Image (cartoon, helix red, strand yellow):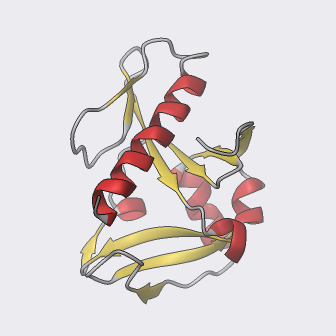
């Protein structure tokens, strides 16, 4: 199995774990099948979307990667329509909002960096945000099995 399909399979598993958490509050929440630029999970009764991000490297680096462009085009934080963002760090889920993420970036005078991520062929621009800064503005839900 190639890297893209392996990552996609892992991503779907993480989305399902987030969906299970969300359904406690929003029973009608559902994963969007196929590619959806706006969000990964949608809650029809409240008309909002949820973006799910996986950053397992954050356990080693202490940083969450918050993408703003890919291949020279705005993406992720710069284009999101999701009300909620969820970061999976390998041992927990961090539920927050794009507004809170932007405030952390602004309050800490963070600057974008450009790099080509592992498995990517095109460069991305992103903020490397200390995980503890996002934890301060997020609701944390532990992942008990450590394997979403």
Percent from the top left, x then y, of residue 11?
42, 48
User: At 61% from the left edge and 54% from the top edge, which residue is drawn?
Assistant: 100
Q: Residue furthest front?
A: 1
Q: Quadrant of the N terminus?
A: bottom left
Percent from the top left, x then y, of residue 101?
59, 59
Between 21 and 148, the residue placed more toward the observer is 148
Image side of residue 6 versus residue 13, left or right: left
User: At 28% from the left edge and 63% from the top edge, which residue is drawn?
Assistant: 2
Query: How many numbered discs sit on the rendered protein?
Result: 0
Q: Is residue 82 visible?
A: yes
Is 72 placed above or below 59 here? below
User: At 40% from the left edge and 14% from the top edge, which residue is drawn?
Assistant: 45
Is 42 placed above or below 129 here? above
Image side of residue 39 versus residue 37, left or right: right
Between 3 and 142, the residue placed more toward the observer is 3
Percent from the top left, x then y, of residue 131?
71, 65
Between 45 and 148, the residue placed more toward the observer is 148
Q: Is residue 62 visible?
A: no
User: At 60% from the left edge and 26% from the top edge, which residue is drawn?
Assistant: 21
Q: Quadrant of the C terminus?
A: top right
Between 129 and 101, the residue placed more toward the observer is 129
Percent from the top left, x then y, of residue 81?
35, 46
Is 13 placed above or below 126 here? above
């Amino acid at each position: 199995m190639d890297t893209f399909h392996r990552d996609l399979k892992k991503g779907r598993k993480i989305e399902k774990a987030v969906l299970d958490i969300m359904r406690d509050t929003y029973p009608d929440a559902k994963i969007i099948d196929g590619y959806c630029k706006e969000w990964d999970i949608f809650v029809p009764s409240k008309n909002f979307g949820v973006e799910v991000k996986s950053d397992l490297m954050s356990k080693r680096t202490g940083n969450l990667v918050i993408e703003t462009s890919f291949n020279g085009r705005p993406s992720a934080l710069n284009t999101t329509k999701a009300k909620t963002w969820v970061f999976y760090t390998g041992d927990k889920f961090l539920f927050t909002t794009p507004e809170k993420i932007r405030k952390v970036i602004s309050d800490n005078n963070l600057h974008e960096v450009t790099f080509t991520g592992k498995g990517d062929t095109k460069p991305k621009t992103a903020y490397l945000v200390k995980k503890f800064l996002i934890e301060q503005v997020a609701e944390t839900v532990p992942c008990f099995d450590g394997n979403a």
